[in-house]
């Protein structure tokens, strides 16, 4: 049961990395003491440096306030599109205490999950144009909620991730129908 809860927590953290890049990493650095992972992960040790914390804070503010214009939003989405699998894999690595093939499989799954969520968001932005500011704040609250669920309630976090994946797949199915990409029966 512990492996299942840890897996759900790692997937919830990876999904938060698919929504935002720096905010989930910043939260893991802040909650480092409460996790009891002071030296357990070399990723956390590297992120605990003042330069890394400063960069994460600046990037978190840029993700929120830099996306007020169409150009800023497209720039942020482009960077997030390419970096979300890397951040999702890092977050999954930090959350997993075990090593071996199971960790490699879950890290790859976390990277793919982050890429799927970011791809759905990027498609939504490029399809509908500039998103309102409240939508950006909702994304931040969702990312914070997923990280907190990964740390405190991993089962609920895993179920939330499954719901997010279903919503992303449903959205891509709707896009296929709008563009006439579905194959009809003859």
Image (tube, grey):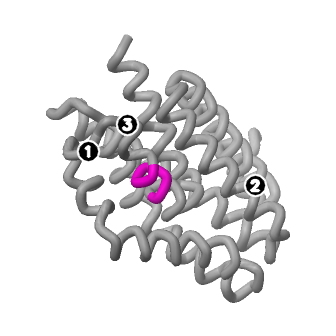
Mark 3 vs mark 1, CA separation in Å: 8 Å
Give the magenta range. 26-30
Secondary element under disc 2, as helix, strand or loop, is: helix
Please tell me the numbered disc located at residue 38.
Answer: 1
Q: Residue furthest top?
A: 1
Q: Residue furthest left?
A: 100
Can you say whether 50 is above or below 20 in the image? Answer: below
Q: Residue furthest front?
A: 33
Tell me the quarter of the picture where residue 101 sits. Answer: top left
Secondary element under disc 3, as helix, strand or loop, is: helix
Can you say whether 133 is above or below 19 in the image? Answer: below
Please tell me the numbered disc located at residue 35.
Answer: 3
- For the residue pair 50 and 75, the one nearer the viewer reads as 50
Tell me the quarter of the picture where residue 35 sits. Answer: top left
Q: Which secondary structure class fits the magenta region best?
A: helix
Question: Dot 1, crowdedness within 10 Å: few (<14), some or many (≥20)?
Answer: some
From the top left corner, tell me how far across and down residue 176 is, in percent.
72, 54
Q: Is 22 one of the magenta-colored residues?
A: no
Question: Dot 2, crowdedness within 10 Å: few (<14), some or many (≥20)?
Answer: few
Q: Earlier in the sequence, mark 2 or mark 1?
A: 1
Residue at image mark 2 = 138
Q: Would you say the residues marked 2 and 3 are in contact, meaning their CB atoms lie under 8 Å apart?
A: no
Mark 2 vs mark 3, CA separation in Å: 26 Å
Tell me the quarter of the image containing the N terminus: top left
Can you say whether 98 is above or below 76 in the image? Answer: above
Q: Would you say the residues marked 3 and 1 are in contact, meaning their CB atoms lie under 8 Å apart?
A: no
């Amino acid at each position: 049961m512990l492996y299942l809860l840890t897996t759900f927590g790692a997937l919830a953290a990876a999904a938060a990395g698919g929504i935002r890049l720096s905010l989930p990493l910043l939260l893991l650095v802040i909650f480092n003491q409460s996790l009891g992972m002071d030296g357990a992960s070399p990723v956390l040790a590297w992120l605990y440096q003042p330069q890394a914390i400063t960069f994460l804070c600046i990037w978190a503010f840029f993700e929120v306030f830099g996306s007020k214009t169409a150009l800023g939003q497209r720039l942020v989405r482009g960077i997030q599109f390419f970096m979300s699998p890397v951040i999702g894999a890092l977050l999954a690595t930090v959350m997993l205490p075990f090593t071996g093939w199971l960790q490699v499989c879950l890290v790859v799954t976390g990277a793919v999950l982050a890429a799927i969520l970011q791809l759905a968001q990027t498609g939504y932005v490029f399809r509908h144009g500039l998103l309102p500011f409240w939508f950006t704040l909702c994304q931040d609250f969702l990312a914070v909620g997923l990280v907190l669920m990964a740390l405190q309630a991993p089962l609920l976090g895993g179920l939330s991730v499954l719901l997010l994946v279903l919503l992303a797949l449903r959205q891509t199915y709707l896009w296929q129908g709008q563009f006439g990409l579905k194959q009809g029966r003859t």
